[in-house]
Amino acid sequence: MSTYSSRRNFIQKLSASAMGAVVVPKMLMASQDEIQLEWLTRNRQFSPNDQIQIGLIGAGGMGVADANTAITTPGVKLIAACDLYDGRLEAAKNIYGKDIYTTRDYKELLQRKDIDAVIIATPDHWHKDISVVAMNAGKAVYCEKPMTHDVSEGNAVVEAQNRNKVVFQVGSQGLSSLGNEKAKELLAAGAIGQLNYAEGFWARNSPEGAWQYNIPKDASEKTVDWKTFLNKSSDRPFDAKRFFRWRCYKDYGTGVSGDLFVHLFSSLHFITNSKGPQKIMAMGGLRYWKDGREVPDLLMGMFDYAETAEHPAFNLSLRVNFIDGTADSTYLRLVGSEGSMNVEWDKVTLKRNKAYAANDDPLMATKLNKEKIESLRKLILPPDTTVYKAEEGYKGAHYDHFSNFFTAIRNKSSVVEDALFGYRAAAPALLCNDSYYADKAVKWDPVNLQVVK
Ligand SMILES: NC(=O)c1ccc[n+]([C@@H]2O[C@H](COP(=O)([O-])OP(=O)(O)OC[C@H]3O[C@@H](n4cnc5c(N)ncnc54)[C@H](O)[C@@H]3O)[C@@H](O)[C@H]2O)c1
């Protein structure tokens, strides 16, 4: 029997005694179908020598959010910030103290011996270059997702981590969450039977949600290091829109797929132990936000995961819609032969197929259905939905992800979302764009990390 096949006996026990009793008996007394996740205590004791000093490279929206979470982890101090826009450097001094070191040049920051780790939260087209230089300088690196801007850049990051033997973690924080951990455990226990389908969806409906960020009034070539921003992309005159709304342009961003699908790949690969899909196909278009952007605002991706030792064959369907009337409905759902799971960072909602829950014997299930059709009376069915919720006070995925990162630095241990994992999560997201622009399916070898021609 393969490792992933459903453990029906285990599940039978689980449903017979009211789902979840086996998992957390204490909570079951309080409520039958709401089960709290255990709150991980990740704040370990550390000595003053264990103080970790960090530098922030890219002090924009996410960089500041990352730094703010990082410094709530005990023993972590931010001492430097780098950015290409002066306004962001001034803001960093206001937040983290006038005495922090600031620079426009990330190489200057990396030369400092008193910096142990860096957060890289620049636009995507800078991730690979800065990550490699930072690891070569011996720094631990927390690099925002997607790990690279193009699929061809992944090996350089993996190679730099292996050669330098430093901690490197990609910033898809969801996979460190209690919700993702519980989903992984439930899938392995056979809670939804044999996985055959997964889907994810992002709905947004606002200018900000569609990346039309404010452009500061003082934006100019004086306050912005435009030439450095361009990196290896085509030279062009200063354009504040390209600098502050970089997600809309192919030279710097990775479209909705690199921005959002990549989170779902990280979580899905963590939950299923998958290395990735073998076939990728995308469709979509620019339907509404026609502000000069080069990327679609509605994208659908379809992905084919072949059977491996870790999981059965399954399909994945992902969607992003930036003009969606149901704005803010975001989900990741895993569907199996016996049920489904909606996975959130602090919650998992498990739904079990009633036929199985009522009786694991298909004949009996048919009989029950027949009786139901023949009788006007409704039948009493066992509960089929179980909600696993994080305890109140849970600090969330972002905190857990940084805790994992700093624990790995202190213990000289590894992280789940290392360069290899990050590459395997980024690749299908980036290839989804390639499929969209080439208007054809793309084949990928997730084991050997190669596009199959
Ligand atoms: N994990 C998440 O949930 C999450 C959420 C949002 C963004 N992100 C990721 O974080 C990264 C940053 O996104 P953002 O929304 O903060 O963008 P942003 O535009 O707000 O910030 C990017 C900052 O990087 C600076 N920058 C550009 N090139 C630089 C360079 N070479 N050296 C130093 N600074 C440079 C810019 O001046 C800007 O201040 C992206 O890769 C994005 O995908 C992750």
Image: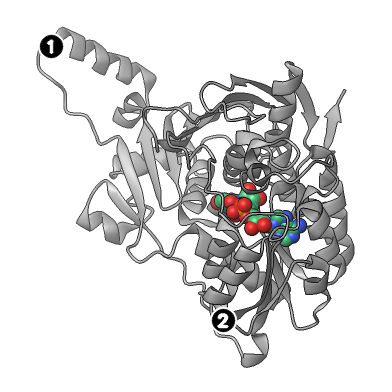
- What's the residue at 41%, 53% (across, down)? 346
Viewer-nearest residue: 265 or 67: 67
> Any mark on residue 216, and which?
none
Mark 2 sits on what residue?
97
| Whether residue 94 is situated above or below residue 7 in the rendered picture | below
| Whether residue 401 is situated above or below residue 387 in the rendered picture | below
| Whether residue 270 is situated above or below residue 298 in the rendered picture | below
| Residue 30 % position (x, y) | 21, 57
Residue 210 left/right relative to 88: left
- Secondary structure of the residue carrying tag 1 is loop
| Residue 378 % position (x, y) | 13, 20
Q: Is residue 172 visible?
A: no
| Residue 217 % position (x, y) | 56, 54
Residue 115 left/right relative to 14: right
- What's the residue at 56%, 64% (across, down)? 64
Quadrant where the image shows the C terminus: top right
Mark 1 / mark 2, whichever is N-terminal: 2
Mark 1 sits on what residue?
375
The quadrant where ligand 1 appears is bottom right
**Distance (Cα) linking label 1 and label 2:** 73 Å
When asked about the image quadrant of residue 408, the answer is: bottom right
| Residue 68 % position (x, y) | 53, 69
Q: Is residue 152 visible?
A: yes
Q: Residues within 10 Å of mark 1 (few under 14, many from 20)?
A: few
Q: Which amino acid does label 1 sit on?
A: Ser
- What's the residue at 46%, 67% (across, down)? 40
Q: Which amino acid does label 2 sit on?
A: Gly
